[in-house]
Image: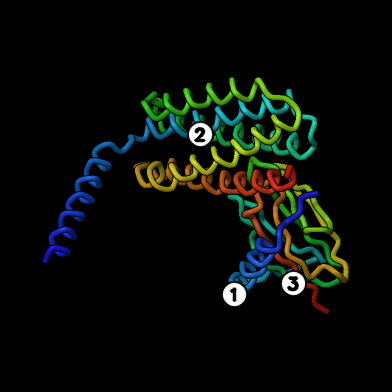
Amino acid sequence: MKTFISAIATSCLLLAAGQSLAADKPTDPQIAHIAYTAGAIDVDAAKLALSKTKNKDVEAFAQSMKKDHEAVNEKALALVKKLKVTPEDNPTSQALAKAAKEKQAELSKLDGAAFDKAYIDNEVAYHKQVNGALETVLIPSAENKDLRSLLETGLKLFQGHEQHAEHVAMELK
Amino acid sequence: MISVPMKRRRFLLTGVVVAAGASLARAHNGKIHVAVENLTFSPADIEAKVGEIVEWTNKDPFDHTATVNGGWEVTIPAGQKATHLVTAGDTVEYYCRFHPNMKGHTKVVS
């Protein structure tokens, strides 16, 4: 009986959590802003890496990040223009930008192998974080099917980046 | 050169077995066409004869590669085509170096 009651209590809690998630779910203009911000952050990180690294694998990785994220952000801009959607700044975008600024400052102080390792480790963690957000929040919340399809391509792309970063991380060890 | 650990290799093999039911690319004029779109090689599985040419057409805005671990690598720039001449040892799995979640397989047939 006790177990049964606690099971009900747990499912009520889960239900409440689900509802509050649903109420807080980002709108399409916010999702577009978050996705664009996430891409722009990685382009900036890649630019810093290209100015610092002397390691060929890290350089090739950073170049790929810069090109891929710029290309996908161009697609995103073309899509919001087509849909006549104005990306809307929001707390998630702001939190991402703040964390990225702090990480950028931290990485700027490093050089050589220490920089390479810190940059690549952060790329693995960052892509993991963004992929998690895409899978659990951004893609399920997107109302427009073109936006959702672009996010799905983005997820595949970023999952590829995560694996590429993991390969480079292994090479650095 | 990027090394793929044993664990990942096994995963690649498993992927190929799962994909084996997919339709195979038909060669015409000695060329086997593989589209690269939305980070997918399509078809992922091809059969080729020695001397035939595999041609990848990259429809993505991203650069890709067809890379054989410890073997050949073809760069397929965004929006462009690239080819590979099939040789006897080309029963291989390949992947994209920039996006290792993209996988393909070639099988040499006589």
Residue A103 percent coordinates (x, y): 56, 26
Q: Label 2 belongs to which residue?
A: A76
Q: Tag 2's secondary structure? A: helix
Task: Name the residue located 64 percent from the left edge and 55 percent from the top edge.
Answer: B102
Number of labels in the image equals 3
Residue A99 percent coordinates (x, y): 49, 26
Task: Name the residue located 59 percent from the left edge and 75 percent from the top edge.
Answer: B21
Q: Label 1 belongs to which residue?
A: B21
Compared with B5, A82 (above or below) is above
Tell me if mark 2 has few (under 14), some (14-19) or many (20+) residues whose alpha carbon lies within 10 angstroms of its own.
many
Task: Name the residue located 43 percent from the left edge and 42 percent from the top edge.
Answer: A133
Tags 2 and 1 both on a single chain: no
Q: Tag 1's secondary structure? A: loop
- Give the CA distance from mark 3 to mark 2: 37 Å
- Give the CA distance from mark 2 to mark 1: 35 Å
Which sits earlier in the primary sequence, circle 1 or circle 3? 1
Q: Is residue A105 left or right of residue A11?
A: right
The disc placed on residue B47 is 3
Tags 3 and 2 both on a single chain: no
- Give the CA distance from mark 1 to mark 3: 13 Å
Quarter holding the C terminus of chain B?
Answer: bottom right
Residue B45 percent coordinates (x, y): 67, 67
Q: Is residue A172 left or right of residue B22?
A: right
Give the residue type that dot 3 points to: Glu
Give the residue type that dot 1 points to: Gly
Give yes or no for contact between labels 3 and 2 (Cβ–Cβ under 8 Å). no
Tell me if mark 1 has few (under 14), some (14-19) or many (20+) residues whose alpha carbon lies within 10 angstroms of its own.
few
Q: The numbered mark 3 sits on a residue in which chain?
A: B
Q: Specify the farthest residue to the front.
A: A2
Give yes or no for contact between labels 1 and 3 (Cβ–Cβ under 8 Å). no
